[in-house]
Image (cartoon, rainbow, N blue to C red):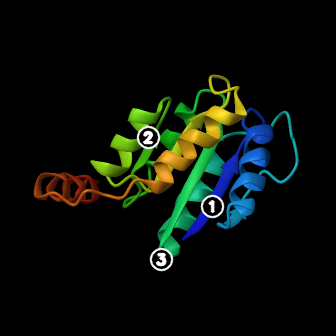
Amino acid sequence: MKIFLGADHNGFQLKEELEKYLIKSGHDVEDVGNLQLDPVDDFPMYGARVATKVLASKNSVGIVLCGSGQGVCMAANRFKGIRASLVWNESGAKASRNDDDANVLCLAADEINDESKAKRLVDVWLNTPFDGAARFVRRVKQLDELN
């Protein structure tokens, strides 16, 4: 599975650590930016870059970070077919995949300042399959059909 990573200046350092961790764990990772710390960059472009990459690539997911996680989540969810989920804890990470088949994980770098917590959230999210229950399939279909 291909993983696309993106972050603004607030999430840059954590993105860099997650990228190393994911590569070391054997994942195929593409960093779509920012590639260097820029204190005045803006989050919308990174949410959009990750979303468009996920939509264009089969068997892929995205991970995006900003200060609150809210901005990149809003940006990614502007794209039809993206189900971006803002996650703070392991139960949320699991539910977003199990129930909602989230294809983009959004993290709040200001809140998740513990690198080991971020890695746990990513691991839970990546390792939780979509349940596929009829009610979940129906709901995901409804999400994907929204304008």
Element at label 3: loop
Camera-near label (2 vs 1) is: 2
102 or 9, which is in the foreground?
102
At x 70%, y 65%, the residue is 30
Q: Amino acid at mark 3?
A: Lys
Q: Visible in this render: residue 74?
A: yes
Amino acid under disc 2: Ala
Q: In the displayed image of the protein, which residue is found farthest to the bottom?
A: 58
Residue lying farthest to the left in this orientation:
134
**Pointer 2 residue:** 93
Find the distance from the CA under tag 2 to the CA under tag 1: 17 Å
* The N terminus lies in quadrant: bottom right
Residue at the spot x=57%, y=33% of the render?
69
Instruction: Find residue 4 and name its label.
Output: 1
Q: For the residues marked 3 and 1, what is the alpha-carbon distance in whole angstroms?
A: 12 Å
Number of residues whose C-alpha sits closer than 10 Å to that of mark 3, classed few (under 14), some (14–19) or many (20 or more): few
The count of marks equals: 3
Say which quarter of the image contains residue 113. top right
| Sequence-earlier tag: 3 or 1 | 1
Q: Quadrant of residue 147?
A: bottom left
Q: Return the x and y of residue 87 as percentages of the image width and height.
A: 48, 35
As shown in the figure, which amino acid type bears the numbered disc 1?
Phe
Residue of label 3: 58
